[in-house]
Image: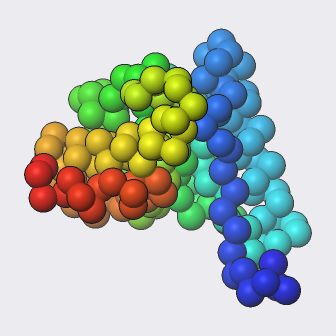
Amino acid sequence: MDEHGVQMHVLTLNGGMPWQLVTPEEGVRLAQIVNDAGVEAARQRFPTALSPRSSCRFVTPTSALKELNRVAGKPGLRAVHLPDSIDNRDYLFQPEFAPLLARIEELGYPILFHNLNSDLFGRRPADAGLDNTFAHAVLAAKFISTGTLDRFPKLEIVLPHAGGAFPFVAGRT
């Protein structure tokens, strides 16, 4: 990292987020292992260069909030890593997830989104370069149109794939 002038590396899982594919109990334990390993790497080896993201079991708002509270304030944690959907469901815009968003906002952590195996645009090979950009543009529009950003004005959102489409649809939301 020093050789290439990289000051910080963000540690996240890819869109597969394995704890979404196991039982709730196994998922909670996997999220704890991932979070604890990231914290330990940041604490012992690279305290200023690694920034692990809190990853939670997001099938239920209760388990997500519990894991977020468990890791909040630990060394290196500077954001929360969320899937953009669960089973193609806009879970974050459901009322039961409001306490989770409120807590994230209170902590001042940005939310880093990653696509979670979305079927929004199908599975054709040509879709591979488009689905992430459009899915994140849709997610950005939903944050605006649902009033979520009005309810949580200090919530910071990072949509790493949105740059390809959102600037062109922003005026239409």
Residue 131 horizontal side relative to residue 106, left or right: right
Residue name at image x 79 percent, y 84 percent: 4
In the image, residue 60 sits, relative to residue 144, either above or below, namely above
**Residue 163 seen in the figure:** yes
Q: Is residue 80 left or right of residue 18?
A: left
**Quarter where residue 155 is shown:** bottom left
**Residue that extends furthest to the top in the rendered view of this protein:** 23
Who's the residue at 85% across and 86% down the image?
3
The picture places residue 160, in percent across and down from the top left corner, at 48, 57
Q: Quadrant of residue 91?
A: top left
Q: Is residue 151 visible?
A: no
How has the structure been colored for display?
rainbow
Which of these two is toward me, 126 or 12? 126
Q: Is residue 27 above or below residue 155?
A: above
Where is residue 111 shown, x and y percent of the image? 45, 54
The residue under the point 46% across, 53% down is 161
Query: 43 or 136: which is nearer to us?
Result: 136
